[in-house]
Amino acid sequence: MLDLEDSGRQIGKKLLSLLLALAMFAGLALPAMAEEPVTIEFWYSFENQMVEQIMTVIAAFEEANPGIKVKPTYAGSYNESNQKLLAAHAANAVPAVQQTVQTSIATFAENGVLAPIDQYIAANNDDMSVYAKGMYEAYSYNGQQYGVPAFCSVCPTMYYNKTFATNEGIEIPKTWEEFDAFLRKATVKDENGNTTRYGCSFAGWGSAYFGPIFWENGVEAFEDDEMTKTGLGSEKAVNVIKMLKGWVDEGLVKWCYGTNASTNMRQSLIDGTSFAVFHTCAVYSVYQPALANNGYEVGVAFPPSGEKTIADLGGSGLTIMAKATEAQKEAGYKFIRWLTQPEGNLVVIKATGYMPVTTECLESEGCKEWVVANPELKNLYDHMDDVYAAPASPVWSDIATKWSDGLAQIFLEGVDVETGVENMIEAINEILADM
């Protein structure tokens, strides 16, 4: 008697063998079993106003790349994130992708924390010339690319009270030679000679904000290609310091430094006790509505020019960790490129004030519409190629701290210029000697 179940098994085996033979003969591959998605942890340091928008971009990425899952994790401030990353690297427990400030690239690259992305660029035939040159080069070190710019700002951006400027006929200076006359017209003092409105407040707590004043006036951070000799004590540097000190001493400029310096400087523009401030373009979304609430219109300008037209690159980029798995590195590369495509870049721009990082984004219809709605930002976007990174030295952060501390002593604590510069350079040389 015929066993139907056994017969069915025999027919099934023959049919499977036939299919396998046909597939081999035709050079075809049978459908693969579904694989588990690759999970990449993404450490970010965004401020609160950006988080919701970035999560939307991540969701869109996952929908377009169903084989990749992103685990976003708040890692604290940039400094906190960097400390955590070094510990995670030592413990072999790294994320796949980190939001990284460019001033950390040299240090992380030197210590093998970051993975170069050149092979992934080549494998995908990506045209990286679409990135703004200075922004892109900030994420390279010793001839290798370690990331891409993503959340980039112009430092310093000159914010000013456009309502005051219009009502009082004050023109915004385009050069440092014009700045003294501007300050004298924009500063307001009472009958006793006390300043009631500063012509400008400077962010003295970070070299990204005050450094370009020196670079534009011909100062070099280092006098040699090996970056072993600082130029921050040169004659040109001393002349800039004397210029700034003269304005501070006259009550034309407020040098903001110390506890709550950023908050206090920001508030001074909002309430009209500073005509202008030098800050980051990343807080445009804070200044614009805050001034509007007080009946003022905000103005935005690229910093004045001198021997050079240049601003420092602020903000951060995206990097991939060397100890991530190869699958995570490949997925991480897709993710960092996604975040810098026009759609992703525009989400960041609209939530903050960060810059377009590619010509693709700048020329997109969405960005053009954004500029029409926020015409002051064109004054920055016209200078995308004038934004460059701080020196790619592993000890630049330490040097910048000594620099800002030294300037604060000269401007705020009564230390004379010669003594202050001498002490500052001595401290910087000790850092360089320990390299």
Image (tube, rainbow, N blue to C red):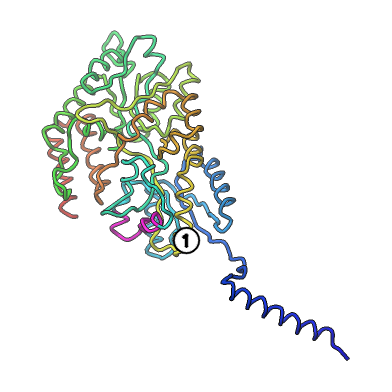
Given residues 365 and 419, the one toward you in this image is 365
The percent coordinates of residue 430 (x first, y second) are 16, 49
The percent coordinates of residue 363 (x first, y second) are 44, 34
Do we see residue 144 in this rendering?
Answer: yes
Q: Residue at coordinates 48% horizontally, 47% vertically from top-left?
A: 338
Q: Seen in the image, is 130 located left or right of residue 66?
A: left
Q: Residue at coordinates 41% horizontally, 60% vertically from top-left?
A: 88
Q: Confirm whether the magenta stretch covers residue 104.
A: no
Res 385 quadrant in image: top left
Q: Residue at coordinates 27% horizontally, 42% vertically from top-left?
A: 390
Q: Seen in the image, is 154 located left or right of residue 367?
A: left
The percent coordinates of residue 357 (x first, y second) are 40, 39
Quadrant the N terminus occupies: bottom right
Which residue has dot 1 on it?
A: 328
Q: Confirm whether the magenta stretch covers residue 121.
A: yes
Query: Element under label 1?
Result: helix
Name the amino acid, label 1.
Gln
Do we see residue 114 in this rendering?
Answer: no
Given residues 404 and 11, the one toward you in this image is 11
Quadrant the C terminus occupies: bottom left
Where does the magenta region start and end? Answer: 107-122
Q: Seen in the image, is 89 located left or right of residue 189?
A: right
Q: Residue at coordinates 18% horizontally, 55% vertically from top-left?
A: 434
